[in-house]
Amino acid sequence: MPKAPPADSSQSSPPAAPPKSAPQRAMEKLGLHRDIDLALHLPLRYEDETRLTPVAELRDGEPAQIEATVRDARIELRPRRQLVARLVDDDGDVIVLRFLHFYPSHQKALQPGARIRARGEPRGGFFGLEMVHPAFKTVEPGAPLADVLTPVYPTSAQLPQAYLRKAVASALKRAPLHELLPAEALPQGHENLPSLREALQCLHHPPAGASLSALEDKQHPAWQRLKFEELLAQQLSQLQAQRERARLKAPALQAARGGLHEKLLAALPFALTGAQRRVADEIAADIARPQPMHRLLQGDVGSGKTVVAALAAAVAIDAGWQCALMAPTEILAEQHFAKLVQWLEPLGVGVAWLTGSRKGKARQRMVERVASGEAALVVGTHAVIQDDVQFARLGLAVIDEQHRFGVAQRLQLRRKLEGDGTQKLEPHLLMMSATPIPRTLAMAYFADLEVSTIDELPPGRTPVLTKLFADNRRADVIARIGDELAQGRQVYWVCPLIEESETLDLKNATETHAQLSAALPGRMVGLLHGRMPAAEKSAVMSLFKGGEMAVLVATTVIEVGVDVPNASLMVIEHAERFGLAQLHQLRGRVGRGTAASVCVLLYGTPLSPAGKERLRAMAETQDGFEIARRDLEIRGPGEFMGARQSGDALLRFADLTEDAPLLREARRSAALLLERHPTVARAHVERWLESRAEYLKA
């Protein structure tokens, strides 16, 4: 049998990459891939190794660095095994270093006669001053001290500080940190800010004597430069998205005289408020243009956003195009569907209903109606954007409570609406939110959006009185429920959990349902939570809306969209566990009729400072904009915006509650760069955002 020819070395596989070390893998998990990533990985705090403190001058609990000679070191077995070293400094004062966990290397270093520098918190012990688990190293007598503060970085167990410090120091030398911004783009009034390279060098290695308070509260000029650069990148990303969209084409949807828009207005059983008319006109003007609208419609709970969306849909449908309305939950989508069918079907508009629970032939029929154009209006959940749903002529997409969709879902939706690049016209996009956006947040995260605000409630909405009760007054609250029911009213009781939790001491919805059923004999008490089948949820809601069910025990699935005017009492259990926006939304489920309404916030004790702030805000105001402002202060923008769903913090360094002046300067500079220095603008966004730019536009 002939031998096989020798392998062609020119076609052989490249040698396998050497396996990565544990620290390298840990760095990748922290997102530290590029030199710029390491340069922007800033210290949590600093240790001052630039000076020595004599043992006699140490203060209990104040971190300090000493230099002394080991007199003796031994392992003690009582009260537990530990390494104890006794050191004496040049003035003859003694201090003990105590290690409850130690290695042979510790014993080897702490030999009698060794010169040691140790840093830790001194405290008075039974045998005098001691430091427990200090950082230490052996030094030669007269060894020079550090001339900069020592950084302490966010890290993990597999990534030692020493390794990370070396990696950051090396990356700082290699990272492309050259000055990109022309002088005219720098923030006005901050002419003395350092360059980006100087700022990062200072933040990683502050010089001896630098103000630790200015560094820690992020008011140091180096921090100001860093925050400005980050805000500028974000504003550039938003403005670029806005300008890219302005180059796209969309159908020009104009209301016809005497058309569907006017017929709907005439058929409505109520008159629009001045604010509703104003925002409806803003939207109508937008969709009449041949560029895609990208508008946020915000308004407090019960301000009447749905009818404004219906009027916009009427314009699109009258112009021969389809409209899609998508909501994050089936309950909310069903509420919209019921209203829109009531308003539009009598006017000859075909409405389709698409949710995850609609399957089989019923779903297929709806999908066919959408594809053929028979259904001019499509209402549903995220099922509206699934792959098998194809629109004949989608001209307007409306997303309600858009921030409650995950970031990935919002990106999927945007790509679905943008199409695959083959379609010639993009649909207009209207996003609605009952969580008003504070001005600084709107400037930061919605810079690429036009914003319409309904700042007026329809007449007839009754103010809701908010009362706070500690959980030990639960029996009093249940007694109040009996009073409400005796007057023919209905009650919500909201719980934060569905079933037992081993980690949170919270009453659950199932237990509360059983308790209220026993306390209110002869009354129907319903249970509603997210794990119930859709048909069962719908049946429960029908009973409650129809007035047959007296009390509805629910989780936060009723947060938005549920409209039962006869409900006059809302009880929220463990209210301290909810966010402010969520509490405000839940409170908005009552006060929808003519009866005086009350929202009771039951809270567990002791309350955290944030919990106290949230409950105080709820008791003091019903203004959704003030609620949103306080929510932003308490939670910060990432949580407020649902950023945690993406795994990416929206802003790492800037704080919108403190840095509004820098944000305004960033907006000015972003417009200037795009106009006069587009190449610089692109380079700046690439440096700062790389792949994260998509998330900022979601």
Image: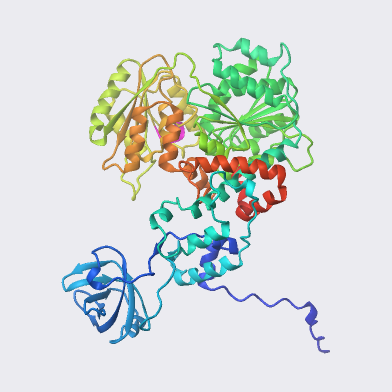
Viewer-proximal residue among 231 and 366: 231
Viewer-proximal residue among 336 and 368: 336
Farthest-out residue, left? 126
- Judge whether residue 375 can be spotted in this image: no
Magenta-span inclusion, residue 688? no
Magenta-span inclusion, residue 557? yes
- The segment highlighted magenta reads 554-558
Residue shown at 53% from the left, 52% from the top: 193
The quarter of the picture where the C terminus appears is top right
- Judge whether residue 117 can be spotted in this image: yes
Left or right: 641 with respect to 264? left
Left or right: 521 with respect to 680? left
Residue shown at 48% from the left, 69% from the top: 165
User: Which quadrant would residue 133 be assigned to in this image?
Assistant: bottom left
Residue shown at 43% from the left, 36% from the top: 529
Residue 287 at x, y = what percent?
A: 70, 26
